[in-house]
Image (cartoon, helix red, strand yellow):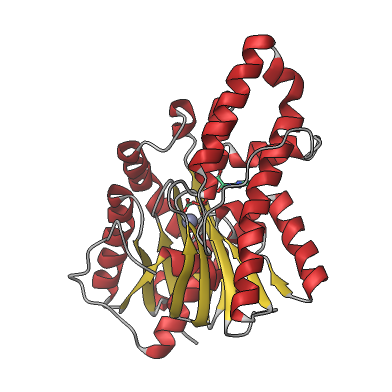
Amino acid sequence: MPVILAIESSCDDTSASICVDGIILSNVIANQTIHQAYGGVVPELASRVHQQNIVPAVAQALSVAKVSKNDVNAVAFTRGPGLLGSLLVGVSFAKAFALAKNLPLIEVNHMQAHVLAHFIAEKKPSFPFLCLTVSGGHTQIVLVNDYFDMQVIGQTTDDAAGEAMDKTSKILGLPYPGGPLIDKYARLGNRDAYKFPEPQIPGLDFSFSGLKTAILYFIQDNVKLNPNFIEENINDICASVEYRIATILLNKLKKAADEYGIKDVALAGGVSANTGLRQGLLQLGEQYGWNCFIPQMQYCTDNAAMIAIAGYHKYLKGDFVGQDVAPLARMPI
Ligand code: KG4
Ligand code: ZN
């Protein structure tokens, strides 16, 4: 019955989770609102707020799980990829806790953990499956052969899907992070109101920078004609942008499913919280007889429960690291 304490601090959410024998008992997430004023995550501020949040987040995770810190058997933490200063806070905390209690340390790759979040729920995908991992920093189609045997078969050549959401919302004058707001307005709009281009990128790769530029020019041109264009049409703009981003993602996922002959298909990462994308995947699933897997909302955006479940599967393999481990801003899957 291994009890694992997991820590996630790769970007702007400080999170702690307790997992007992592969079951998540708590998942505490402390969001940082300070970045809203800057229109994006400010790395130096993020690491300072992580320092303030990490001890209370861990205390709460233990308390919600009704687990004493003396009962913890191993400490799992996000080693990378992410912001170095943010990662450093989580890595240092995990190392200190493990040192004080003489516990093994388990390093976790944040992008693998997004994929492994699917093993929290009772209904689990079977290997091999495809996972479309879409976040603020990444857009990948991952061929998942086993828990820690993953291959990126398609990825963005420029911006990530979440970045496209956030940059569009910035153009529209909405606060950061814009993805959830685009989702909210899109529910009230007509997705066919405006046609944005679908980039013609070969293979399974993505590109979002051309779309971002097209949206910028579209907004600038229309605001010149009508200064109230954004306010009057925000729902239709968001619905049309969301629809284009979702179709770009899902068309490539369909291509990958065909090429690899795979019918277990999953979504992961912050953008998988998006309603249009979730609905689109389910529709494709119905059409092509796929088994679709979409994580619960709390396991879509950054969270320590996914680090805990990844840590649990590494614990079973005895895959531990020493106290000399350091964070990695870049860490391939
Ligand atoms: O995985 P995540 O929490 O952090 C990273 O590792 O990047 O993903 C954050 C991204 C942001 O770009 C945010 O705007 C986007 O996920 N996001 C959404 C929604 N919720 C979060 N995008 C669209 N619709 C949403 N509902
Ligand atoms: Zn993430």
Q: Residue at x 35, y 67 (%)?
A: 332
Can you say whether 32 is above or below 289 in the image?
above
Residue that extends furthest to the left in the rendered view of this protein: 324
Q: State the image quarter where residue 239 is shown.
A: top right
Q: Position of residue 116 (x, y in %)?
A: 53, 73
Q: State the image quarter where residue 255 is shown.
A: bottom right
Q: Position of residue 302 (x, y in %)?
A: 51, 55
Looking at the image, residue 318 sits to the left or right of residue 111; the answer is left
Is residue 219 shown to the viewer in this render? yes
Is residue 68 shown to the viewer in this render? no
Q: Residue at x 35, y 59 (%)?
A: 81
Q: Position of residue 124 (x, y in %)?
A: 65, 79
Q: Residue at x 22, y 76 (%)?
A: 322
Q: Nearer the viewer, residue 70 or 95?
A: 95
Looking at the image, residue 192 sits to the left or right of residue 319; the answer is right
Can you say whether 37 is above or below 111 in the image?
above
- Pick the quarter of the image with the C terminus: bottom left
Can you say whether 239 is above or below 291 in the image?
above
Q: Residue at x 50, y 62 (%)?
A: 140
